[in-house]
Amino acid sequence: MRAAVFYAPNNIEIKDVEFKLGQTEVALKVKACAVCGYDTRVYRNGHRKVKPPVILGHEICGETLEEIKTPLGILKPGIRIAVSPIIPCLSCSNCKEQQYNVCNNLKEIGSTVDGGFAEYIKIPPEIIKIGGLIPVPDNLSNQEAALLEPLACCLNGLSRFGKIDKEKYMLVVGDGPIGLLHLQLSKILYRSKTIVIGKIPFRMQKAKSMGADAVFQFDTNTEENVMNFTKGEGVNRIIIATNNSEIFPFVKKVANKNSKINFFSGFSAGNTFEVDPNWLHYNQVSLFGSFSSTPNMLQKAAKLASDGEIDLSQIVTEKCSLDQIEHAISYTEEFHGLRTIIDRF
Ligand SMILES: [Zn+2]
Ligand SMILES: [Zn+2]
């Protein structure tokens, strides 16, 4: 099959590779695979989790080639599938609580094992067992279906906030696809007053059209703008959906008492930021992260998109063939459009 094989930083090759299926694995034909910021970081710098050669790509819409029995029912051949890319061990303490995304021995499609920048992918039995193959509703395109995975990750991130009070302010730092998905969820699920901090004019315009209550450019006035908009109150729930570490001092200044801050994005290795423990203590501030999602959330994402609550079509701005993978990666890291999708193989 044709695949984009990652060999080393700045070295990806399109080539024919052997596709050998293990006894307990099933194959899916890849219909679309989106380029995530994670893929661009691995391509440029490598990653401690990634041992090349490997095929990247974890935001996948596939198609069944044979009948597959899953806990959610039988999947007939020719059915489109959104893939949960996490491969849990099923025996650690987190797996026992169905917290598969934080499995202590986690493997991941498109990171530790081959992913979706290829004609076919192998699905290991663990993914089938946890219900990680979700049928794609008919009214979603292949490209939209590929974005159910990041949407599920946003649902996971928001679920970690606990109660979200619509009288208080939600701040989304970042105007990329993940920031805009959080914005849509914040407005639809919680009716929250939502502020977006951005940098790219096209994306900030999108944020306004998607219903952000305020959109501010990240510059020297951002703190003042946010404090004025919130009448001096500051914000209560913060999602960091950027890997620009320059935002840390700003976030600390606008976070109010009892605020919760989710480090949603992965950062390049070596990024750190300082925290005064008394700021956490006296203001009762919570800092936490969120990573990936579980099949339940992928299912919920499929329903939200299919019901038209969340519009994934607005996030798809560029479609490429597999041959154009390097273009797709540069396009993503240079902040052109929103998500770029590989949909021809
Ligand atoms: Zn991703
Ligand atoms: Zn586990």
Image (cartoon, rainbow, N blue to C red):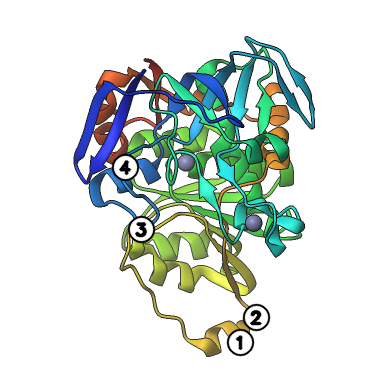
Inter-mark Cα distance, 3 to 4: 14 Å
Which residue, given by chain and number where applicable, does mark 4 sit on?
Answer: 40
Between the C-alphas of marks 4 and 2, the distance is: 36 Å
Please, is residue 203 above or below residue 241 in the view?
A: above
Q: Earlier in the sequence, mark 3 or mark 4?
A: 4
Query: Which of labels 4 and 2 is toward the front?
Result: 4
Secondary element under disc 1, as helix, strand or loop, is helix
Left or right, 161 with respect to 113, comes to right
Q: Which mark is residue 281?
A: 1
User: What residue sits 69% from the left and 18% below the top?
Assistant: 137
Find the residue positioned furthest to the left: 10
Q: Earlier in the sequence, mark 4 or mark 2?
A: 4
Q: Residue at x 36, y 50 (%)?
A: 50
Judge left or right: residue 241 versus residue 98.
left
Is residue 211 something one can see in this rendering? Answer: no
Instruction: Choose the circle earlier in sequence order: 3 or 2.
Output: 3
Q: Secondary structure at mark 3?
A: loop
Helix, strand or loop at label 2? It is loop
Q: Which residue is mark 2?
A: 284
Residue bearing mark 3 = 48
The answer to whether residue 216 is above or below residue 123 is below
User: CB under 8 Å between callouts 1 and 3?
Assistant: no
Evaluate if marks 4 and 1 touch, with contact meaning CB atoms under 8 Å apart.
Answer: no
Measure how far apart labels 3 and 2 are at the Cα level.
33 Å
Q: Earlier in the sequence, mark 1 or mark 3?
A: 3
Closer-to-camera residue (216/247): 247
Q: Given the image, on which type of amino acid does mark 2 rest? A: Gln
Q: Nearer the viewer, mark 3 or mark 2?
A: 3
- At mark 4, the secondary structure is helix
The mark that comes first in sequence, 4 or 1, is 4
Labelled pair 1, 2 in contact (Cβ < 8 Å): yes
Going by the numbered disc 3, the residue's amino acid type is Arg
